[in-house]
Amino acid sequence: VKFVDEFRNRDIAGGLIRRIFEISTRPVNLMEVCGTHTVSFFRHGIRGMLPENIRLLSGPGCPVCVTPNRDIDHAVALSRRKDVIVATFGDMMRVPGSTSSLQKEKAEGRAVQVVYSPLQALRLARENPEKKVVFLAIGFETTSPAVAMTLLQAHREGARNLYFLNSQKRVPPALRALLQSEKVGVDGFILPGHVCTILGREPFQFISGEFGRPAVIAGFEPLDLLQAVWMLVSRIESNEAFVEIQYTRAVRNEGNPVALDKMEEVFRPDGALWRGLGWIPGSGCRFMEPFDAMDAGRIEVDIEPLREHPGCLCGEILQAVRTPPECPLFRSVCRPEQPVGPCMVSIEGACSTYYKYQC
Amino acid sequence: VLIHAGFAIQQLDQEEAEETIQLLKQLVEIR
């Protein structure tokens, strides 16, 4: 398959690993921001092939994981209304809120539907004109254009029964918050190729410009990851900091202008609550005024009092302050078939990945 | 194309892909 097999070439991978060993002289912490990268590092066994002085930290780039309990409780409360159908991506079904989850609610007979695209939620709204269809909009800038396009289409059609429970997040402000918090020392960032396909390079320039750290926008195949590590280690060893693109086959400097235009038409930046990272200014997406009527926040519900599981360390794991095996619940109480926190639910969550790949 | 949440978000650039592979081969000295 073009673009896949070529980027899994064993000989080139071996050569890249040798090059990394040759240039690496000091301990470095590299953060793979995105859950897809975390999975790829584990799945291809790359972590075990790198020099011991290179430490890989999993960052906050799993949208399911960073969605706070408050938003899950809100979705649960909406699902309890008889006139509402909740439409959600499958990963969100099993994420526990304070006392319930969408999966539990569905088992109780509530109308909760798994969809693969926000457009399916629009179709549900057309097919069920007597119901309010609420799409649980989670995701980063990779998903936001799809939500924006659906919202615009619904608006054009004059759909009156489609709503969005908006929990979308923006990645750059979260990275700024991480760097400002100084809770964890990150020497270089592996940036998510798919998010940067939309955003381009510019929104991440502050990482090198203001914080003096190098960053590489990387693809998801083994050679992409190894090249990104090599690029970062080269920069760190030379005391240089730039934001560079490794994933040149997909990412342009300017990003995807069409997608950016649609996002700008529909959303404006707003503060947002992240699990683990707390309230981050400018890290959320608020609807522009013409689309306010589609905000599910307008539907009246009683949301239960917030309750966090006292032993769950997802919040600290998302900041890379702790690793999954350091959580007392990991493998004992919290397992993929019975998750306590979202990082064990999502296939891109750090806990789920450690559970699956680390013996 | 790269597809996410039911939408094509980017078309992959074959020339860039081939260039990257060539660059990596040169870097690790594979002919």
Image: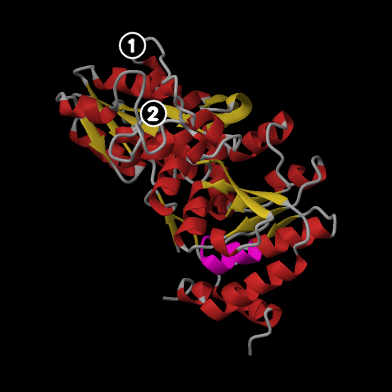
Q: What's the chain of the residue with tag 2?
A: A
Mark closer to the chain start, 1 or 2: 2
Q: Which residue is drawn at 40% across and 46% down?
A: A355
Q: Which region is colored magenta? A: A220-228
Residue A109: within the magenta? no
Between A215 and A156, the one lying in front of the other is A215
Q: What element carries label 1?
A: loop
Please state which amino acid type lies under the numbered disc 1.
Glu
Query: In the rendered image, is residue A129 in sight?
Result: no
Residue A226: within the magenta? yes
| Label 1 Cα neighbours within 10 Å, binned few <14 / some 14-19 / many ≥20 | few
x and y, in percent, of residue A7 in the image:
52, 72
User: Gap between marks 1 and 2, in whole Å?
Assistant: 14 Å
Q: Which residue lies furthest to the bottom in this view?
A: B31
x and y, in percent, of residue A20 in the image:
69, 67
Between A177 and A252, the one lying in front of the other is A177
Q: What's the chain of the residue with tag 1?
A: A
Between A62 and A351, the one lying in front of the other is A351
Q: As displayed, is residue A248 above or below residue A263?
A: below
Predominant secondary structure, magenta span: helix
Is A256 situated left or right of A65 in this image?
Answer: right
x and y, in percent, of residue A229 in the image:
66, 60
The residue labelled by disc 1 is A300
The residue labelled by disc 2 is A164
Is A342 situated left or right of A208 in this image?
Answer: left
